[in-house]
Amino acid sequence: MSDSQNSLLSSKNQWLYQQIEVEFPTKESIEGRALYLSQAQQTSLQPWQPQSDQAMLPDSIFLVDFHRLTIMFAQLQAKRWEGAEQQSLIVEFLTQIIYSEPCELYLAFDSGEPIAAAIVTRDDTATLISDLALNDPALADSFVAGLIEKLQLLDCDGDIFVEQMAS
């Protein structure tokens, strides 16, 4: 992994780790963070390569910037875990997120329902699109392409990486 990739991944994981660094974090949010970061260590980063011309409409993708969207983001992310107990812990952890740099959360909707979610982490030289949570895995390329279009990342001079689950 390049220095840029390591830096982005480290920034994102450190940002997530700090989300519950408060005076009285709940036991469930601490356990949720441990689950989340355990899975985060099983990923790799790949340079983004367009897979098709089918980008999700940027108007269907929204920055998560208020609590109701955070809850939707957390619920969609939790589906990546097996079992109600683990999912509950992930929701508890992710609903504690405070919006701050270097990360932003995004949700895509279809007919008012959240269908895709991701975390975008940026620095001066690159962007990481990670933590893809999708109702339908076939949406991955379309969602990433739509997010790149929405954020106008192709107009920047930086690299774009996408996090992949290790096989």
Image (spheres, rainbow, N blue to C red):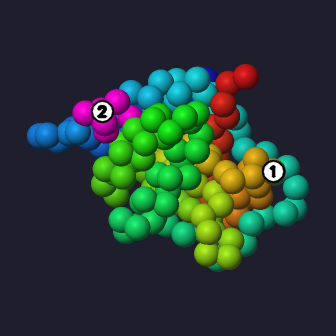
At a point 73% along the width and 22% down the height, the residue shown is 167
Is the residue 131 above or below the residue 117 in the image? Answer: above
Locate residue 131, reporting x and y percent: 57, 43
Q: Nearer the viewer, residue 123 or 21?
A: 21
Q: Is residue 30 left or right of residue 21?
A: right
Residue 89: mark in rendering: none
Q: Nearer the viewer, residue 128 or 20?
A: 20
Regarding mark 1 in the picture, which secondary structure is present there? Answer: helix
Could one spot residue 54 in this view of the protein?
Answer: yes
At a point 58% along the width and 33% down the height, the residue shown is 82
CA distance for labels 1 and 2: 32 Å
Q: Amino acid at mark 1?
A: Ala
Q: Which residue is mark 2?
A: 30
Query: Magenta includes 120?
Result: no
At a point 62% along the width and 48% down the height, the residue shown is 133
Counting other residues with Cα less than 10 Å from the Cα at mark 1, is it few (<14), some (14-19), or many (20 or more)?
few
Is the residue 136 above or below the residue 11 in the image? Answer: below
First to last magenta residue range: 27-32
> In the image as oriented, which residue stretches furthest toward the front?
84
Is the residue 158 above or below the residue 153 in the image? Answer: above
Is the residue 84 above or below the residue 63 in the image? Answer: above
Counting other residues with Cα less than 10 Å from the Cα at mark 2, is it few (<14), some (14-19), or many (20 or more)?
some
Q: Which residue is mark 1?
A: 138
Locate residue 67, reporting x and y percent: 36, 65
Image quadrant where one finds the N terminus:
top right
Q: Amino acid at mark 2?
A: Ile
Locate residue 70, reporting x and y percent: 42, 60
